[in-house]
Image (cartoon, grey):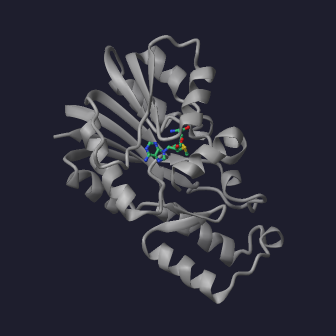
Amino acid sequence: MDRNYWEKIAQNYNAEIFDVFRNDKTGIIREAILEHSNNSKTVIDIGCAVGKWIPFLSVNFKKVIATDISAKNIELAKKNCKAFANVEYSRTDMSDSKLKISPVDFAVCINAILTGSLSKRTVFFKSLSKCVKKSGTLILVIPSLESSMYTSIIRHRWKVDQQLLKASSSTKAKAIKYENLQQGNVNIDNMPTKHYLREELILLLEQEGFNVTKIQKVEYSWKTEFVKPPRWLKEPLPWDWMCVAKKK
Ligand SMILES: C[S@@+](CC[C@H](N)C(=O)[O-])C[C@H]1O[C@@H](n2cnc3c(N)ncnc32)[C@H](O)[C@@H]1O
């Protein structure tokens, strides 16, 4: 999941990429952002992609800095959000160890730290810390490994969507998949995608000088996981982790 991957996917972004803004039916992320919104503050949207969160951020903050590694995504975000004048756009690679960035009061980073590369993730987390001023706040949303495992167990135990998922894989492919899983990298559309444990996320943020003040589930419908979810399958729903963290 490098820059090329995101540049290639840009033209088909809406069809390919899960829309957290639309699927957060309870509005838990918006609620957490509103708790920190202030029309004298600047917010940075890290990994803004095609700008799904920009209109909401624009009306609730003085200024929005919208950043993404993909130039094509940034172009689409500009086009989609041209009605919002208080937005500054910047192509930024959060996995660049030489990144220089002016820290702001408030940062959101929603499902952007997905790379299977440990070295890229390590720098990304360090860059998160560079983006936020002392006593500033970060809202980080990332895929939950617990939720992914729960879904996988249900899929196997009750053979959900079995007719649709007949692909078999070689011994080598299975070994790679197993090795990836040890790191929390789960394949999504054949792409190793980092998923995080709750405790792992707290540890990673604390290591970068944040104090985690809240960690909650962002719940989605079972239809986001299965084509045909069993009728009896109710709560707990599949989820991402949302973390609110204060820079020490
Ligand atoms: C799944 S999309 C999420 C988009 C958006 N936050 C949302 O919720 O709609 C992930 C985005 O993170 C961006 N991204 C991935 N790695 C990045 C990096 N190293 N630096 C900056 N952006 C990155 C990708 O280009 C992509 O647009």
- Residue nearer the viewer, 15 or 232: 15
Residue at x 57%, y 40% (from the top left corner): 20
Residue at x 38%, y 57% (from the top left corner): 120
- Vertical placement of residue 103 versus 122, above or below: above
- Vertical placement of residue 8 versus 38, above or below: below
Rendered location of residue 110, percent (x, y): 47, 41
- Vertical placement of residue 223 versus 33, above or below: below
Residue at x 50%, y 34% (from the top left corner): 48
For this orientation, the residue located farthest to the bottom is 171
- Residue nearer the viewer, 137 or 93: 93
The quarter holding residue 139 reads top left
- Residue nearer the viewer, 37 or 6: 6
Rendered location of residue 219, percent (x, y): 55, 47
Q: Quadrant of the C terminus?
A: top left
Side of 236 relative to 222 (left or right): left
For this orientation, the residue located farthest to the right is 163
Rendered location of residue 246, percent (x, y): 24, 38
